[in-house]
Amino acid sequence: MKILKNLSSRLFDFGQTVYNWKYFNIFFLFCISLIFYFPVVVKNQLPLPLDALVGAHTPWIEIKWPGYEAGVPIKNQEITDAISQFYPWRSLVGEFWRNFKFPLWNQYMLSGVPLLATLHSAGLYPLNILYLLFNNITAWCILLFLQIFLSGVFMNLFLKDLEMGKISSLIGSLSYMFSGYMIAWLEFATGGHAAVWFPLLLLFLLKFAKSLNFRWVAFAIVIFFFVFSAGDFQIPLYIVMAFILFSTYLYLFINRSSKFVIGSVLIIIGGFAISSIQLVPTIELFINSQRVNDPYIREYFFGLMDWQKITNFFWPDFFGNVVTRNYWARFGFHEYLSYAGILPAVLFLYSLLTKKMKHEYFFVILGVIALLFLFPTLLGFLPYKLHIPALSTSSASRIIFLVDFCISVLASFGLEKIIRYGIGKFMKLIFLFLAGTSGILLGLIVSIYMMKSGNMEDMQMISNLGVSIRNMVPQTIIILAFLFLYLFQKVLKISRKMISISLGIALLLLTSIDLLRFAWKNTPFSEARFLFPDTKVLSYLKEDKDNFRIVGPGIPMNYFMEYGVKSANGYETLYPLSNAKWFSLVNFGNFNGTAGRYGEVSEICSPLLGFANVKYVVDYQKDPADFSISDKGEYSKCLRDGNYEISAKEGRVAAFHNPGYLPKVWKAEKVEYIDDESTLIEKLKDIHSGEKTIYISGQGGGEVFSPDDGFRVTDLKEGLNEIKFSMKSNSGGYIFISESYNTDWNLKMDGSKANLLKANYLYQALKIDAGEHSIELKYEPFSFKIGLYISIITALFVVFYIVYEKYVKKRTA
């Protein structure tokens, strides 16, 4: 026993030396982040759900992958937006950055739509500088690593300024960086990155409250730009609300000076102003978008969290997990991932039940408010009843971010109280928690026994309850391990202070193990060979040098972007209403079926697709019963009955040539001006395949032109935010351009500004005279220019003040 006691004492002394190292916390967080990234750093895997790409989607499932004779297993199919939206968009943004252009227009989807204004592309996010230095996938990997590492570092700095000790700060940092929200949305690289900067923002506000030095105001304004440009709009909204609440609290209890009020207001105004370059185009697009008509959020109970899922905070897999294919609760799993560590959760409870330290009450109140908006309470339904912009069209579950943040902060407070005042009361809570856990386990076991012994045996529910029992075990083991370490040290009879600190370290290590296990389980890492590999169909499309688009279910929406292939389809939560109406027109012949976030052509043989520049329809053999891909299935009936020929085929997937294909630019044989929308719909419904007719939106007459055999287009180049071509025509007339019409497209003909017309409801047209012409179209949104000027002026003020504070004011003092 004496030897063990001496060994424990020496280990304690060594621990104290390491603990006192100035950069211990940062080093520890970096090491933990690297350990989590082990599959990337050591095994050369990629942080993307690419297993779902090649294991579940056409045309990739037609390839027999070596080592996967039965098909590639899929870890988490709920987060495929990472590969269908966020990675392709970020890659496109990278292309813009490398060409030193603003990422304003996405030419690849939905016949062309705004890119920057959607916000989700995170086109202006400062950490995108990685795309200037590295290729797309390397930049992506570093970007995701920085979310984990920086969120821990900034939380650690904030907690230290709240007067938390080193270990207490680390517990809160670990809990935050690997919390449910941060892990659930890690591979989207948007909302999680907005959340990265939240602790730093509060830190600067707290420092300003203590010092009234306006340089902290300037720094906070800059941080708001990071928050607003990160690619998500819900998390920034929550951050603004929490920031206002925190500034109110600091004014009431820390600094009641007018200077603090002025500084706080300046941060909010300056934050919005410096972010205007992003916010103004986004607000304009939102007002004119299909978002308000999207029924998606209503179909999922507004994203409100079922009361039964409160278990997620203690046992994240209580209702199973999509990764292990045994999830049995309502709605999705990934959307409600809220775990922040079992020991931090108990420390959070300890914080609630004990005397409060300085600032602690604020985070209790903030956490309670967030919980009331998360669950189906009166407050939870309020944004949807009042139709509050942005919030009423978004999932309530995203406020889990704030809940996890408060749990992490209060866990730090809880541990700090243990280290300062002793561990006795906390151990009582541990025993109570274990007793409660035992009661739940006993209840589940009894329920299973009664079901098995009853006349009405529900085998599915018995299996479900068995899942719950098994998935309570890992957290129970963590709690028991901590209890064992406590009892072991009591047996050694070491000092009270030593017990508190050593158990603080034990809490840290056990929490690291717990959260790493949780994060690894829910984060897909995929083999590098699955990063958008080529197939026969995709290779054929890439090799076709024409400027064209595709439609059809054979290539899922947005996946075509990584191959440089354009489509009339697209999956985007925010895009112009006019594009959504066009889908309704193609699919239903009216505007009553306006598309939501899934802009998909279901009438894949519609003659209107000629105007969309659709050259290929990519389809797969479908089972007539459920439309799943099948060896015995057939391609869509209209493809079999029409004049469609297979251009490329691989397995059950084929690309059909559209006989009604029209090139990107063509000259009309008939033109008519139509000012009435209903008349326009009827005219377009009567269009024949390949017909070169243009209906101009507006007042005017009708003209018929003879076919112009001399008309030709040369040097057609579709660049970033621009379209250029030269043309020659033996006679005057109208030219059709298959790109979504937008008033922010500026047209120049032969170097002079010309009038761009809206044609066939969605596309572009212009009037020409006979002869040769050079045409240049540039997308230059006015809202972006306004936002740019406001952002530049604000940034100049901020830089001026920082320079003044650091050099001028210091010299004159």
Image (tube, rainbow, N blue to C red):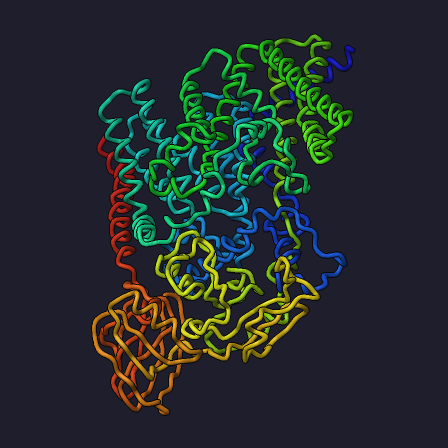
Q: Quadrant of residue 161?
A: top left
Give 781 or 589, whichever is nearer the viewer: 589
Give 461 or 107, whichever is nearer the viewer: 461
Residue 241 visible at all = yes
Q: Quadrant of residue 95?
A: bottom left
- Please give the name of the residue rendered at 45% of the width and 39% of the height, measured from the top-left corner: 302
Instruction: Determine whether, in the image, residue 340 is placed left or right of residue 68.
Output: left
Query: Where in the figure is residue 545, as x and y percent of width and height?
Result: 50, 78
Q: Is residue 164 above or below residue 107?
A: above
Give 89 or 599, whichever is nearer the viewer: 599
Instruction: Determine whether, in the image, residue 112 is placed left or right of residue 525.
Output: left
Query: Where in the figure is residue 378, as x and y percent of width and height?
Result: 40, 28
- Please give the name of the residue rendered at 66% of the width and 15% of the height, measured from the top-left corner: 435
Quadrant containing the N terminus in the rendered view: top right
Query: Where in the figure is residue 283, as x and y percent of width and height?
Result: 31, 49
- Please give the name of the residue rendered at 36% of the width and 40% of the height, measured from the top-left corner: 224
Q: Quadrant of residue 96?
A: bottom left
Instruction: Determine whether, in the image, residue 651 is placed left or right of residue 365.
Output: right
Q: Is residue 283 above or below residue 699?
A: above
Furthest residue in direction front, as rendered: 455
